[in-house]
Structures are given as C-alpha cells and as structure tokens.
Image: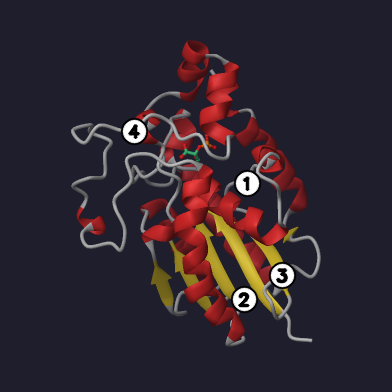
Amino acid sequence: MTTHTLILLRHGNSDWNQKNLFTGWVDVRLSEKGVGEAKRAGELLAESGVLPDVLYTSVLSRAIQTANLALDTADRLWIPVKRSWRLNERHYGALQGKDKAQTLAEYGQDQFMTWRRSFDTPPPPIADDSEYSQINDPRYVGIDGAIPATECLKDVIDRMIPYWESDITADLAAGKTVLVTAHGNSLRALVKHLDGISDEDIAELNIPTGIPLVYKLDENFRPLGPAEYLDPEAAAAGAAAVAAQGNKK
Ligand SMILES: O=C(O)[C@@H](CO)OP(=O)(O)O
C-alpha cells in the first residue's frame, strides 16, 4: 500500500501571540521564543528522520521564518518552496490588533468564543481604512480571490481545501514528504478535513506553536491512524496554552 507522509507545522510564537493580540492576516514576526521553537522543530524533524522534500507556506512572514529556521536546523534549506495566500491564517476581521483578554472582558465568554472558535460565524469585517486591513498589501495584488475583510473557519476551509486538492496532494502523490508550515486556524481547517472532525467538535481543537505533527496517509490521502506530534508532551501543554489565551492578563 502506498503511504504518504505529511508534516504540519504551526509557526512559532509570534510577537502578537506574546502580547495576546488577535493577529489574522497582520504580518507580525516571530518572538525570540518563536525563533527557539522553530529551531527546535527542525531538531525534532532531524532526530525523527522525517525529512521534507518540499515546503508549502502561507505568504505571512511568521510561517516563512519558522519554515526557514526549522529547515536550516534540519539541513534541508535547499528543498523547493511553494507559497500561497490560501494557507494564510484566518482573517480575523475587526478583531485584528485587539487584545484577547480585553475583548473577552468587554464582550463576555460566549461572544468571545463564538468569534474565536465557532465554525461559521465570522467576526465583524475590518474597515478598509484600518491600519490592520490588508486591502492595500502588495502581496495580495492579483490573487485568485477577493482580499477578505473577515473569515470564519468555514471560509478558510473553502479557500484552502481546493489548494490542498490541486497542489499539495499532487506532491504527496509524486512520493514526496510534504511540510506545510502555516497557522493555528488554517491548520485546524486542514486537520478537520483530514480527520473528519465535525463542525461542533473542531471548536475544541487547538494546535500548539512550533511542534511538527506527522500524518501517514493512504492513497486517497486519508489518515492511516492518528497523527503524531514529534514532542507529544510539549504539544499537549502548548495546545492548553492556546485554549486559555483569553484568560491571560
Ligand atoms: O490571533 C490569531 O490569529 C489566532 C492565532 O494566533 O488566534 P486564535 O487562537 O485566538 O484563533
């Protein structure tokens, strides 16, 4: 039986993860902690011998930095790279740049969690003249879709899964081990698709920063078993920290 290997990696801790701000499509960089996580991800890849042949990233710097640091550490900086806005973080609409703890205090737990984790309720759209809008960002000139003003998880699935099917699975089918370096919510969308998680249950799934998650897939790109984090203990602690984010002071 053909087995394909897919590695998912959420970018390391960013400056805005550190400050507990909603980020979305705002192009923030890795924090010092995130740089360390990205290098550690590369060590985990090298130690486990799961070595990517091709890299996919979003067009956001924190994912690109993470991939470069991890691949440099694993001595795989030379592999081919493909980038797409379709792997971007979920656009967080008018919440981009807002403090998560303040938003929770202002709007209450239910509204806060609806915006963060509901399947099909997007946050309010961001205004075109907001300093955190991407409407004039040169990297999105001519993209094959409208630049979003907000997105829910369903919107991310709708823009990402076609790319998974057209491009990423083609590399897997060619026998390549594929590394996808992306974001908390774009990877939640892909994991939902791969693991067949319901619209309700996906709310409970949080992806930790900087820890490779390895899938073995069959010839139809369905998982042969549960995906495995290369550092399961750190992954559990990291996922719990993401879940608790609004509560940070
Ligand atoms: O702010 C964001 O863009 C995301 C990821 O950091 O946050 P959340 O986990 O709250 O969806």
**Residue 176 in the image, given as x and y percentages of width and height:** 59, 83
> Of tags 4 and 1, which is closer to the observer?
4
Mark linked to residue 51: 2
The answer to whether the residue labelled 2 contacts the one labelled 4, judged by CB atoms less than 8 Å apart, is no
Position of residue 52 relative to residue 21, above or below, is below
Residue tagged 4: 125
> Of tags 1 and 2, which is closer to the observer?
1
Q: Earlier in the sequence, mark 2 or mark 4?
A: 2
**Residue 37 in the image, given as x and y percentages of width and height:** 56, 51
State the count of labels: 4
| Residue depicted at 48% across the width and 63% down the height | 67
Q: Earlier in the sequence, mark 1 or mark 2?
A: 2
User: Which class describes the residues within 10 Å of circle 4: few (<14), some (14-19), or many (20+)?
Assistant: some
Q: Earlier in the sequence, mark 4 or mark 1?
A: 4
The answer to whether the residue labelled 3 contacts the one labelled 1, judged by CB atoms less than 8 Å apart, is no
| Residue depicted at 48% across the width and 66% down the height | 162
